[in-house]
Amino acid sequence: MTRFQLGLLFSGDSQDLIELLTHRQHTHPHMTVRAVMEQATAELGCCPQAIARATEWLQMDIEQPVGRLRRAELLQLARAVHRFWRHTTPADAQQTSPKSGSRDE
């Protein structure tokens, strides 16, 4: 896949996630995918529910080291998280937000 084709597939938001995943893969290859995605939530503001749905949809073992992922798997993960993140409703995001003290039942 060429750089142009990759550019067409991803918008700026998913590109930030790709860069974070790639950076962590090279600098901290022994960190688990779960730990890296928690950092993505803290640094980029990714929705934890979108991350959970994406890893479940991809049937990804989140306890494996991020250094073991292939480039294609990183791209799939970033694209899936971004897609689920865009489709997360504000109510869903509020339910998973650690800042919300109480949930309306």
Image (cartoon, rainbow, N blue to C red):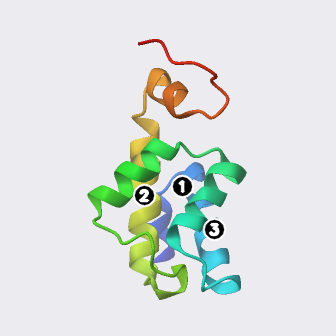
**Disc on the earlier residue, 2 or 3:** 3
Q: Residue at x 58, y 46 (%)?
A: 46
Q: What is the secondary structure assignment of the residue under circle 3?
A: helix
Label 2: which residue? 79
Q: What is the secondary structure assignment of the residue under circle 1?
A: helix
Q: In the image shown, does 39 or 12 lie closer to the viewer?
A: 39
In the orientation shown, which residue stands out farthest toward the top? 104
Residue 99 screen position, x and y as percent: 67, 29
Do the numbered discs 1 and 3 sit on residues whose CB atoms are within 8 Å?
A: no
Few, some or many residues within 10 Å of mark 1 (<14, 14–19, 20+): many
Q: Is residue 1 visible?
A: no
Q: Amino acid at mark 1?
A: Ser
Q: Quadrant of residue 84?
A: top left
Q: Residue at x 69, y 50 (%)?
A: 42
Residue 19 - label: 3
Q: In the displayed structure, would residue 3 be above or below residue 27? A: above
Q: Quadrant of residue 62?
A: bottom left
Residue 14 - label: 1
Q: Residue at x 65, y 76 (%)?
A: 24
